[in-house]
Amino acid sequence: MAADLDIELYGSKTRPSSVMNSIFMYTVNMAAKTLVSVAQSSKTGDRDKWKTRDHLRFMVMLMTWLTVWILRVLMDHFPITSSYSYYHLESVLGPSSSSSSSSSLPSSGSSSLDLVLYQGFDTPSVKALGRALTHILALVNEMPATSTKYQFLMAMADRIMEGNARDDHEELLQVNRTALSSAFARTSNLLYRSLQSRQSQEDSTAWPTRAIKALPLGSYIAPYLKGFGYCVNLVMSLVDRGYSGGLQKRREVDAEDEEDGEIMAEKLAQELLWITNKLRLYGDVEQALFHWSFSSALASLSLTANPRVQGLILKISAILFGDVYRENNGVSREVKFRLIVLWLPLFCHASNGVAYPVLTSFEKVEIERAMDEIIATLPAADQEIILTNWLQDFTVSASEWPNLQISYDRWCQSARQLV
């Protein structure tokens, strides 16, 4: 029985479509009704004699049965009727229904049927692939890092970019570059908003600490002041028992909000570092350099960010400085100047860490060399501004790096030659 069904469905005889079956059944029903009507009318009258109306009804019945037989022959021996029915279904139900129905057609007519089904519909394009990759990278920003779907999205983005770069096709490589450049700008803006929100909370609760940090050597005093403030709050909560419950609850909520904000900022900084490395892999950091050179608000907030977030931002800046050094001729003077002016204070004041150093000794030497080479390519007026600001930050910071004394001495020597 199953074999018979397979032959009927997938053999040389195509199965009639639902439209043709509807016509067939309607014709059969009409012929049957006509025959029943003639039989009933003959019972009420003379049994041996038909009226003219009965003859006409009988002729209609015969013509109906003839039509049924012709339709049956057409459906059994002319596949074009079936193709027409699928085309009609496509126009009514859409391409998805027609394509699923076409799977039951024989393979011999699949090529001609495809021309009918997909004529006039757009095929997948490179632009669609770029939109898909951009969408995935945007979902990565929104998805929590603790979710299992986060790694799923990261792996999917990696597969798409690796597939695009497999054959070194320039158009497909450009898809990766465009999507990553857009993701870099979006992620850096989200990181700025996250740090800004955290900064606003600190401004509303700990403005004396911020004021002390702004003073020379204030970064050493601020942690002790913060600890002293916690002790005072604890004593006040113990003294005032009537309000201790509400104060403790508010303190716990504030601590949770601060922790969530720091976790989100660290997540975004990790993603920005990942995007930066991908841009370098696919040979396009120009847009990242341009955007980073105009991120003055983010550079300012990074000075007071959490040490873990600060370290990630420092790594991104170090990578971009190295790219400027390697592609010296392809970077404009304005981008070089703004990168040095905006991000050099972070290198001076960032916490380098103890258990987990942000940069190794070799990396620090390479970055110093890159800074020296970049500064040497700038006009004397730009060098004066950069080196004056560096000296101000370097003398008040706890770090001995970066030491740009060679660049400072070279600028002084070039100034003496003008006399």
Image (spheres, helix red, strand yellow):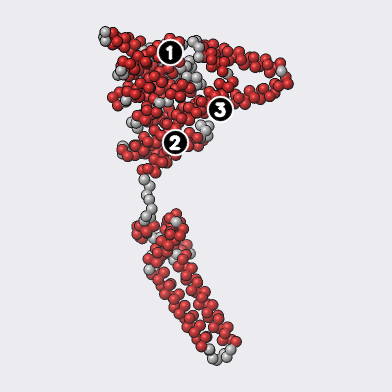
Q: Amino acid at mark 3?
A: Asp
Q: Earlier in the sequence, mark 1 or mark 2?
A: 2
Q: Earlier in the sequence, mark 1 or mark 3?
A: 3
> What residue is rendered at 51% in x and 83% in y?
57
The residue that label 1 is drawn on is 393
Q: Amino acid at mark 2?
A: Leu
Q: Say few, some or many: other residues with alpha carbon within 10 Å of mark 1 (under 14 / 14 to 19 / 20 or more).
A: some
Q: Say few, some or many: other residues with alpha carbon within 10 Å of mark 3 (under 14 / 14 to 19 / 20 or more).
A: few
Estimate the x, y position of residue 144 in percent, counting from the top left: 52, 33
Q: Say left or right for 403 vs 259.
A: left
Distance, label 1 to label 3, CA atoms, is 31 Å
> What residue is rendered at 44% in x and 36% in y?
137
Distance, label 2 to label 3, CA atoms, is 22 Å
Estimate the x, y position of residue 119 in percent, counting from the top left: 36, 56
The residue that label 2 is drawn on is 137
> What residue is rendered at 37% in x and 27% in y?
289
Question: Dividing the picture into quarters, in which one does residue 103 lie?
Answer: bottom left
Dot 1: element: helix
The residue that label 3 is drawn on is 260
Q: Earlier in the sequence, mark 2 or mark 3?
A: 2
Mark toward the viewer: 1 or 3 = 1
Q: Say left or right for 284 vs 256.
A: left
Q: Residue furthest right?
A: 242
Question: Dividing the picture into quarters, in which one does residue 107 lie?
Answer: bottom left
